Every structure is written in structure tokens, then in C-alpha cells.
């Protein structure tokens, strides 16, 4: 699959290393005011019955974008993990707290669009995914290698 940037490459590698099937920008989800959202990675991980989406992004200090993610979650009931290179503290200082809009926020240091960080970032994401999967309410659901819901 053709990805847009090295951040997304790092997520793809982590998912492949763990054997977790996922769709990449699989479908368009309509939102209010004619807007739409294309989730980056719809995974086969379910947490509390909600399918997990991984959304790697650059700096997330745009509250308009965060509100869009929140509307998507509330409309379609996915579990959204936003991954970025901005610390939670710095985002709050700039007036946007992602934890108010998404289910989980993962800060990955040096999570940039530079190819030199892909391998290191994929290890960090894999570690976070393993932590997520250790939640007793998390499960990976596969049906003949395909996702059950998309």
C-alpha cells in the first residue's frame, strides 16, 4: 500500500510486526457541514467492543481538526488513538488538549516525517500497541484474515 509519509510507515511496520490486520484510508465517513473523515488505520483491534483506529499526525494544535475527530468518534463509535510528536503539556500550553477530543493520545518523541526515524518510531508504536493489547477488554478479531467491520 502507498502511504503518505514516514509517520504512517512507522505505524504500518508496527502493525505488520504484530500481525494485526488493518485497512489504510479505506473509506470516507461523512460528517456534518459536508465534511468527511478518512481514518488512517482501521485496525482489527477492538477495545470495549469499539474498533480501534490509529491516526498518526503531525502537530495537533488545531482544535478544528480535533473537533472533527471527536465528531467522527461520537457519530461512528470507533476508538480513536491519535499519535503525534507534540507533548501533551505543550499542546495544553498552546490551547488544545487532544485528550478532550479523542480516546487516547500517544506522544512519540521524534515522530517526524524524516525517514531516519521510521524504524525507531515503529518500535515505539509497537510498544504502545502491546500495552493497549494487554488491556483485558482488548482483543484482535480476525475472520479469514479480513476485518469484520470497516
Image (cartoon, grey):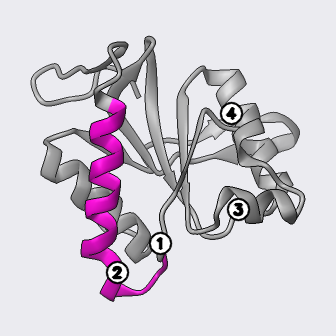
Q: Which residue is mark 2?
A: 117
Is residue 122 left or right of 150 when viewed as pictured? left
Q: Which of the pair 73/94 is nearer the observer?
A: 94
Asked if the magenta segment contains residue 2, the reply would be no
Q: Which of the pair 137/71 is nearer the observer?
A: 137
Q: Which residue is mark 3?
A: 60
Q: Secondary structure at mark 2?
A: helix
**Distance (Cα) linking label 2 and label 4:** 30 Å
Compared with 23, 148 (above or below) is above
Q: Secondary structure at mark 4?
A: helix
Q: Which of the pair 85/52 is nearer the observer?
A: 85
Q: Secondary structure at mark 1?
A: loop
**Distance (Cα) linking label 4 and label 1:** 24 Å
**Rendered location of residue 98, percent (x, y):** 72, 47
Q: Which mark is drawn over residue 55?
A: none
Q: Secondary structure at mark 3?
A: loop
Amino acid at each position: 500500500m502507498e502511504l503518505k509519509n514516514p509517520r504512517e510507515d512507522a505505524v504500518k511496520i508496527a502493525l505488520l510486526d504484530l500481525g494485526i490486520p488493518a485497512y489504510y484510508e479505506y473509506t470516507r465517513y461523512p460528517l456534518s457541514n459536508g465534511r468527511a473523515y478518512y481514518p488512517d488505520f482501521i485496525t482489527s483491534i477492538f477495545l470495549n467492543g469499539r474498533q480501534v483506529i490509529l491516526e498518526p499526525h503531525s502537530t495537533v494544535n488545531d482544535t478544528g481538526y480535533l473537533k472533527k475527530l471527536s465528531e467522527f468518534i461520537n457519530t461512528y463509535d470507533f476508538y480513536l488513538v491519535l499519535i503525534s510528536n507534540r507533548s501533551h503539556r505543550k499542546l495544553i500550553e498552546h490551547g488544545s488538549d487532544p485528550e478532550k477530543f479523542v480516546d487516547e493520545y500517544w506522544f512519540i518523541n521524534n515522530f517526524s516525517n524524516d525517514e531516519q526515524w521510521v524504524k525507531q518510531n515503529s518500535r515505539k508504536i509497537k510498544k504502545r500497541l502491546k500495552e493497549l493489547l494487554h488491556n483485558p477488554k482488548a482483543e484482535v478479531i480476525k475472520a479469514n484474515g479480513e476485518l469484520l467491520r470497516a
